[in-house]
Image (tube, rainbow, N blue to C red):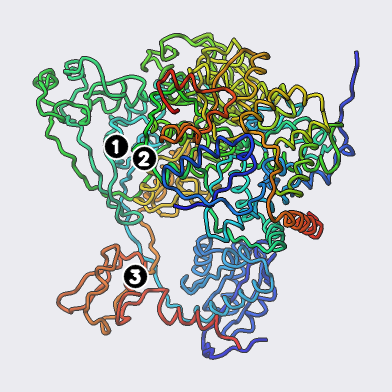
Amino acid sequence: MELKRTVKFEADRDPEFARWISHTVGGERIRHCLQCGLCSGSCPLSLYMDYTPRRLMHLSREGFKEEVLGSTSIWLCTACYACMVECPKNINITHLMYALKQRAITEHFYPKRFPIPVMARQFGLMVRGAGRITESRLIVRVFLRTAFWRLLGMSALGMKLFRTGRMPLLREKIERRKEMATLLDSVTATKRELAL
Amino acid sequence: MKFAYYPGCSLRGTGRAYEESLLAVFRALDIELEELDDWNCCGATTYMSVDELTSYALAGRNLALAERKRQDIVAPCAACYLVLNKTQHYMEDYPEIKLTVTRALAAIGLTYDNHVRVRHPLDILLNDVGLKAIAAKVKRPLKGLKVAPYYGCQIVRPYSTFDDQRNPTSMDRLLEACGAKMVHYSLKTRCCGGSQKGTLPEIGLDLIHYLLSEAHKYGAEAIATVCPLCQFNLESFQKESGDRHHPISIPVVYFSQLLALALGAPANKIGLQRSLVPIGSVLAEKEIAYA
Amino acid sequence: MRDLHGWPDPGPIRIGVYVCHCGANIAGTVDVRAISEYAASLPGVAVSRDYKYMCSDPGQALIKDDIASHDLNRVVVASCSPLLHELTFRRALNAAGINPFFLQMVNIREHVSWVHLDKRAATEKTQALIRAAVRRVSLHKPLQKRRVPINPNVLVVGGGIAGIHAALTLADAGKQVHLVEREPTIGGHMAMFDKTFPTLDCAACILTPKMTAVGSHPNIALRTYSEVVQVDGYIGNYKVKIKRKPRYIIDELCLGCQECIAACVYKEGKAPDEFNLGLSKRKPVYLPFPQAVPQKVVIDPETCIEFKSGKCKKTCIEACGERKAIDFKQKETFEEIEVGAIILATGFKTFAPVRNPNCGYGRYQNVYTSLEVERLINASGPTSGEVVLRDGKRPHSVGIIHCVGSRDANTNRWCSKVCCMYSLKLAHLVKERTGAEVFNFYIDMRTPGKGYEEFYDRLLDEGVHFVRGRVAEVSDWAVHPSEEGKLVIRAEDTLAGFVRRIPVDMVILSVGLEPQADAQDVRRLFNISCSSEGWFLERHPKLAPVSTFTEGVFIAGACQGPKDIPESVAQAGAAAAEALALIDAQFVEMEPYTASVLEEECSGCKSCIPLCPYQAIAFLEDKKKASVNEVLCKGCGTCVAGCPSGSIQQNFFEDEEIFAEIEGVLSYA
């Protein structure tokens, strides 16, 4: 019989994390959360999450960073906004999920070969370089870096899409491609300046 | 009526039929579209997970390009529609976001002063053209074709500028005006899983299956969608979902395809041949000819 | 130091200036000590002090003592809004032997310390206001309050439990009460309930004796099926116009035998029965419910054939026979009454759950509101007390959803206070009647009243499932085979930590309470205010819950905010007591802020007469001059401003007094 000791001491809290979530864009009203559970009730993904959205909100505002960034919840969220529309306190839950995703990616808090941050990075690189996404190329890039064997399983579907003209192989790009890098670099510079 | 047309990356790829049919619909209704010059990817939901400020800057470039011509944008792709709207809202509500985006745009010689409206085709069809005008132009009535309208998330939440958030009816009313019979089921705004099918397949399949089986249960002969990812999800994995749950085969089309069909567009402009679950036999049964 | 320009010689005027700290309320922002010193430097100021709480006994004593010892003849008090303590300080002046209107209040709390953050600027503003007051007060005249007699009759609007209790209390005290109720019978919402929490008393059993008492009390003039349409006058002297809607029944002749209903050409009811919330049908001639007071039937012109076509057999008249109580030609009538006080007890309405689409009301037929279920449970309701589904079958499982339309930024932010208790009550009654499995979905269990927590305890023992989680949706979508054909409630069981899907046969929505739909119209009629949420506004949330800012108009019951029956009755008693306090004083003292015409200057142009909202100005034909009736004048100042030759002046607001204030503010270098 394996026993686990789960008491939490104040030292286990991360006050910076708690402060960050209340002050980040979308976190203004997190302290108003009554823990009613409507978000979890509306979320179509909550049944798969280790911490439901409601629990995640409370854990975040209390500063339990490890639990929050290590949860499956933030990766399961599809940003369908069902929670936000229903929330009786108008808390911007979807946006907080995005913020937690961003922070988890920045701090490398995810399992190896996890497809979502890989997808996000490849997406970003493609946009920076070409200004637009070519779906087929993106999928290939992501699968190659995560579970390349699944590409084989997808090949039948890929063929069908190709045959129906829905999988162009030519790279989609904009004319003034250099603007992308300028645009993105400006954002990075402003972020650093404003310490955002 | 003239709009800046913002297709988004998907409409050149998996969503090609959406673009084809939508352009046909707008042509039939004399609405002029000018593709937004050198538009870039809006970032969709993916970029928001990486870096939200960049996401707003990406969307901001498109808004600025449209503002240069003082045109409103029509964005058919649900994700693009949401991201563009969200960028506008957040720029107004958060000074630091406005500052960041304004600077980034200035770095590439653009400005944006919130003079552009971002609209969805359903909005334009319903509110600018009107049901009466559309019904008058129907050449191939849909003869009671049982259609399950699937709105998905992003055009109704969180910025439902033209329809009710929890019980939208814009697509219903448009397709009814074309002679279709709408199937009422309770999941029309429930998330299809988005990109989760790619990253967490079992979960993606479950979500897709719920939608397919409920539409099927209420007798739908086709599902009409507004989003390229929803359309892709619902039509591409019917066999896989069938293996895991129980088999269902039901054509999934864009609402604009049904509209283009009804308005008499030529067959090669409706994109029905691009479907992975063909609708041909259903249409034949209903004696809706479109060759 | 600022120079004072053009300040007149104060002469014999000796002013005392008192600056209140109001604890830290004023002193936290305004430098009260500096102000007091500054005031001392102004011409005419003989004494200047600052003190922590001027309104307290020692504070007032300061003023009185100074008046005596320093020979003061004018007083300036810089403190809170005059609405709060002008009267207090006027009384102090009176007690010290000088005319109470030789006081000028300066509001440095609501107008300065509560609205400004910059301390230096706030203090400077206060200095300007003090100068204004000091200059003005020298010009004050010795005014006298007027005494006006009070009409001892009372109007009570609304015949629910609050209105009934207020009316009975006043009537027992010997006052003539006019009770006006918009429905054909009194009883309000309480008449619709089956049992009341926490005692599970039968609502009708405790209510109907009070209703009958109202109907037979010699001091209560009951006007049902009536509405107030106009209110004129002021405290102690209200003139109210009441519209009586036609019942098409002659009240004095109808015995309530109901033969007409039985004889009606409609064999069955076809119109939705309002009292049963549309769950059953009624005929065009009907009695709202068996214990209606008055026991008189009503004919509804919208559904009666005689009104629509004029060609009905009128079997009702035949059945009425010699009593001849039916009169299809009856018209609405108007009545004017005079009262001294008014009590508004107009109650609430329930939240319409169609505004919350996720709960499935209107979409799925077996989703009911709590009020509808009260009617089902009630023995004289549409199903004779059987709790059944629309198809007549008993439910095996029932879900009760708390907080529908309450505690929600998307609908109503407030907590409706009574729903947790009535949800527990319904859980108990439903379980008792049907043996079904009952699930209550709540966020917090709010049971603060006497015996309420004990009632919750009792429920806990009865095997009801309590799931703490706000319900996200009610849907017919089945995922699990056990859910087929049922209504599935999806919510997170927050205490357990996972999402649950619970299939039930019947869903009961615990709808919240809202202000009546016409609350804004009613409040304008009676010249009171509503809070931002739409409830009638009390004078003070803690210390004056039943009086309003309009003197002589009181509020009681749920129209002031959501509350249960004990509180409604308590407030009704309180309102009745305050009305009695007003009436038994026999006189009301009116402020002397009336306008008067300076005859020598009046040109007789008559511009002022149509301007007066109270019709208080008459034209004296013999002198060809206008004249203001002091008793009717409310001191609004419209005629004063409107007179083209400036020949109307208003007490306490004379031109030179106002100019003195302005000059006071501006008089620095």
Residue closest to the eye, C538 or A105: A105
Please report, as a chain letter, where disc 2 is located. C
What residue sits right under mark 2 in the picture? C170
Give residue C220's mark.
1
- Image quadrant where one finds the C terminus of chain B: top left
Q: Are marks 1 and 3 on the same chain?
A: yes
Residue closest to the eye, C503 or B217: B217
What residue sits right under mark 3 in the picture? C638
Residue at image point 29% right, 37% down = C220
Please report, as a chain letter, where disc 1 is located. C
**Three-letter residue code for mark 3:** Thr
Q: Where is residue C429 in the image (x, y as percent from the top left)?
A: 50, 15
Please report, as a chain letter, where disc 3 is located. C
- Image check: C4 left or right of A120? left
Q: What element carries label 1?
A: strand
Where C128 falls versus C410 (above or below)? below
**Three-letter residue code for mark 2:** Leu
Q: Position of residue C575 (x, y in %)?
A: 43, 43
Among numbered discs 2 and 3, the one appearing first in the sequence:
2
